[in-house]
Image (cartoon, rainbow, N blue to C red):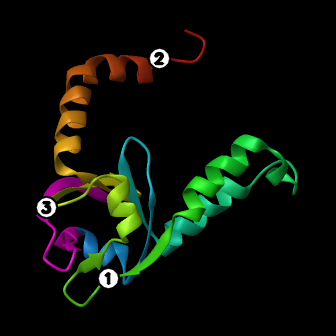
Amino acid sequence: MLIGEYIHTIDEKNRISLPVKFRKELGKKIIITPGLDQCLFIFTATEWKKVSKRLSDSDSDLSFLKSDKRSFNRFMFGRAAEVEVDSIGRILIPDFLKERIKLAGKAAIIGVEDRVEIWNDKTWIEYRDLVEKQADQLAEKLGQKDDD
């Protein structure tokens, strides 16, 4: 399971080192894609296959006829990149993905169970602080049964 919060520096060659605790679980090839809430998602190859299957599954083989599905799949698949993890655990994030979240200097690397998220460190701190203030209400909401 991928868990934890780490702040890492982006080096002069635009590489970022993955936390040691994540390296073994992620493997040598990972998929980086635009995420939600102003971050990037990193998936293992195995998890990416599961995500891909869930995104392309539908009641019919003609799921491409649904506008929302086409749009979201373009967002996730069209900007995804397969990236190699080097021998000391660094990755090179493609420029178009770095620019998307204004990544420079430092990045927050967050383990979220089945994926890793990469955030602009300042954006992450703002988001984390906001969610921490709402944690009690979110827990209450998530704990309610659908028929309540």
Q: Nearer the viewer, residue 30 or 25?
A: 30
Residue 67 to residue 14: above or below: above
- Which quarter of the image is occupied by the N terminus? bottom left
Bounds of the magenta segment? 1-21
Return the x and y of residue 38 as percentages of the image width and height. 36, 45
- Which quarter of the image is occupied by the C terminus? top right
Q: Amino acid at mark 3?
A: Gly
* Farthest bottom residue in view: 87
Q: Nearer the viewer, residue 137 or 144?
A: 137
Mark earlier in primary sequence (2, 1): 1
Quick check: is 101 in the magenta stretch? no
Q: Residue at x 47, y 17 (%)?
A: 144
Q: Amino acid at mark 2?
A: Gln
Q: Quadrant of residue 44?
A: bottom left
The tag on residue 105 is: 3
Mark earlier in primary sequence (3, 2): 3
Q: Residue at x 18, y 31 (%)?
A: 129
- Whether the residues at callouts 3 and 1 have beta carbons within 8 Å, the answer is no
Residue identifier under label 1: 85
The tag on residue 144 is: 2
